Image (cartoon, rainbow, N blue to C red):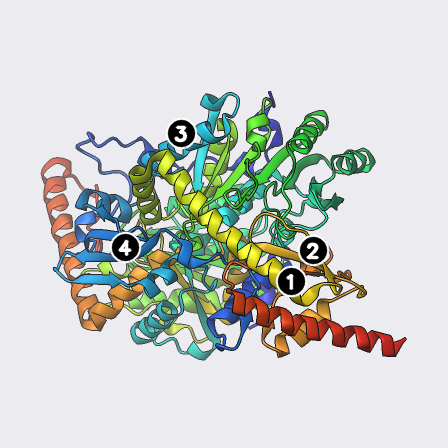
Amino acid sequence: MKYSRFLTQVSRNRQPSLIREMTNLLAQASPELVFMAGGLPNAQMFPFQAGSITLKDGRALTIHPKLMMDCLQYGPTPGYPPLVKQLKDLTQQLHSPPRWAEMDLIVTAGSQDGLCKALEMMISPGDYVVTQEPCYTGTLSILKPYKPRYLPISGDQNGMCPEALKAALSKWKPEEVQDTEKDVPKVLYVNPNACNPTGVSLPEDRRQEIYKIASEYNLIILEDDPYYFVQFGDRKDFPPSFLSMDVDCRVIRFDSFSKILSSGLRIGYVTGPKPLVERIVLHAQVSLLHAPAMSQVLVSELLKLWGDEGFFKHTDAVQAFYLDQRNAMLEAAEKHLSGPDLFTVPLCH
Amino acid sequence: MVIHGSYFSAIARRLTMPFLSRLRSASKASTVYNLSSGLPDPELFPFKEASFVLQSGEVLPLTQHLIEKAFQYSPTNGIPELVKHLTDFTAKLFAPPHMSERGLAITAGGQAALHAVLHTFVDPGDCVFVPETTYSSFFSTLETTEGKPVIVGKDRYGLRPDLLRDTLERSSSGRRKLLYIIPNADNPTGSTLTKERRQEIYDIACVYDLLIVEDDPYFFLQYGSQTHPSFLSLDTAGRVLRIDSFSKILGPGLRLGYITADKHFTDKICTLIAAVTIHASSLSQVVVSELLDRCGYEGFMKVTRDISLKYLEKRDMVTQAASKHLSGLCEWVETDGMFLWLKVLGLEDVTEMVNHTCRERNLLVVPGSIFQLDATQPSPYIRINFAMITPEIADKAFQILSDIIREELRKEELER
């Protein structure tokens, strides 16, 4: 795929920050290296030496002095290396992206940060954006200053309707717009699970159809999936993600720990085609440097302590809790708000 | 006083605080039937309690109540307790005029603050006045606003007010919007502006209607007997945007900094923060807030003084090693901060030498050229970060550098 078609001029102009690149070198440095580059302060002077976090299951995460330095010192922009590896392994395990070798991952300050960077990478003022309707307000806030031309796609209790998507795009001929850069839609935004705000989820067949249409019209799919783990039902029955069917390498996926581990830590991650993730990394180099290191280390240590079994046991518990909440809410709604077509039963969250 | 709205970029003007962010800030604990924003239930977060051991041996506990705060969404401009601490500190340290009309916005580090400030105020074509050498990432951060950098000359004491005036006089097209400056322990030169220069620069900014972005991450690494007033202390007109950072004293991994400016300015900056990161890490904020609570103002000043003395030792180590190995080969001045700014004598440009020869011999230092607007221009300067040196490392590093410079000079001699 020719990714430059999707980039704004600003994104194309981004160059690597030399200082950030030098700090990356330190991570792989040999002991022979005399490092007097970068703006790294002396970590031994920071007032925090060590720490410990007690979990609700009684176990503890120990932050020994070396790990505390990882929490407090500058780190690489793509993310704390052990966490990046864990998240890549998790992504491969859950989604088996068909073109995994051509993809990359960056840890961001919450998935909002990743989403913001992805949108700013591709949307110039007045550009088209294909969105679900209604749409997550956080996305609309990011886009507002760019005054985009929205193509809102209506949905029903199974989410975005492929027919409506086809209809909205029908004013263009696919073969004519494949390579066109201006005045054509190039970006599709979707919450596949527990859509915010409607709570509905796309079943597998709709995802396949939407992917096919996106492929015909050469759209990048922004798969914003913070509620992935709070889908109700057995994990083995979860419908496949857009990432898992991404034979064209056109999906940028946004994952978040906000609903299952912590929203305050500001940790999310973006997975997508290498050339596009690289642009996001360059943006992060000048806007954030990297996601909070203490937060990244905590998440990494927690995932290490739990292992896969512990992690999925936790997500199952979260899912069960929200299912109870949903049922309680439905009962109250039935009691007080009953009437034809007044509400839909959410399949998640 | 400035007319705040007239400085915002077109993008900033179109941004409003997201509805849900406003809702989150407005929600009171007493609201029983809150079915509004997307706050997950903290009952499900796996963390219960935490404690941090300080270098002093003291323990800083985070109780369950604080843990919930640390791991949940928080207000855009920062956790109220931390905002209060920092507002009080700023008032005590700098006594800014009309402090009650100023706001404080906590950001994900000084870099995030700088990025947010530039995008809030700079339109394509706006003139942004910058010292001729400055923080190397500044130019790439500015580039994405399509603002026009205009270079102002410096000397060993920092930005020259007379050259700023000349440059402003000569600048023709584009709105003169803001001046970017690192007043203390400048990056890369280490110089600290005198009180007189600060007042002159401030007065010039008033005449030419500039905003001043005062980027001050090395504030606590000043080694003189007195610290100098912040531009904020002089700011009668409300045109200063001050960026503070915890990176050099508490740890850059926390990604925590803050902007102090007139409330109209910080409110608008918060609309950008809300759209991008939502807020700075709650955990980082709670940890720092608890530390400040424990220390109090005096205690925190003592912590920073102790850190500053340790960096001063390092500075003396590095200048000693420089005197031993680089006398006659380089020139330098003893400055504040954590950088030594060496000028190599007899060579017009050391960029290749630093990027190749030094690297081949396992010496990683920074060529002065990258701190210029045009990094391809020659520069005889090298920036040395001495934060982590020991006498042995400094000795080894400057021995290597001395050998490399001599070889380079010999090569040039032969080529002539």
Image quarter of residue B171: top right
Does the rendering let one see residue A92? yes
Mark 1 / mark 2, whichever is N-terminal: 1
Amino acid type at image mark 4: Ala
For the residues tagged 4 and 3, is the chain the same? no
Q: Position of residue A153 (x, y in %)?
A: 41, 52
Mark 3 / mark 2, whichever is N-terminal: 3
Disc nearest the viewer among 3 and 2: 2
Residue that label 1 marks: B322
Label 4, residues with CA under 10 Å away: few <14, some 14-19, many ≥20: many
Residue that label 3 marks: B88
Amino acid type at image mark 2: Trp
Disc nearest the viewer among 4 and 3: 3
Amino acid type at image mark 3: Asp
Question: Could you tell me which quadrant the N terminus of chain B lies in?
Answer: top right
Element type where label 4 sits in the image: loop
Between marks 4 and 3, how big is the CA–CA gap? 43 Å
Residue that label 4 marks: A194
Q: Position of residue B169 (x, y in %)?
A: 81, 33
For the residues tagged 1 and 2, is the chain the same? yes
Question: Residue at (14%, 39%) from the top-left corner?
Answer: A338
Between marks 1 and 4, how big is the CA–CA gap? 62 Å
Disc nearest the viewer among 1 and 3: 1
Between marks 4 and 2, how big is the CA–CA gap? 61 Å
Label 3, residues with CA under 10 Å away: few <14, some 14-19, many ≥20: some
Residue contact between numbered discs 1 and 2, judged by CB atoms under 8 Å: yes
Write down the chain letter for disc 2. Answer: B
Between marks 1 and 2, how big is the CA–CA gap? 9 Å
Write down the chain letter for disc 1. Answer: B
Between marks 1 and 3, how big is the CA–CA gap? 41 Å
Element type where label 1 sits in the image: helix
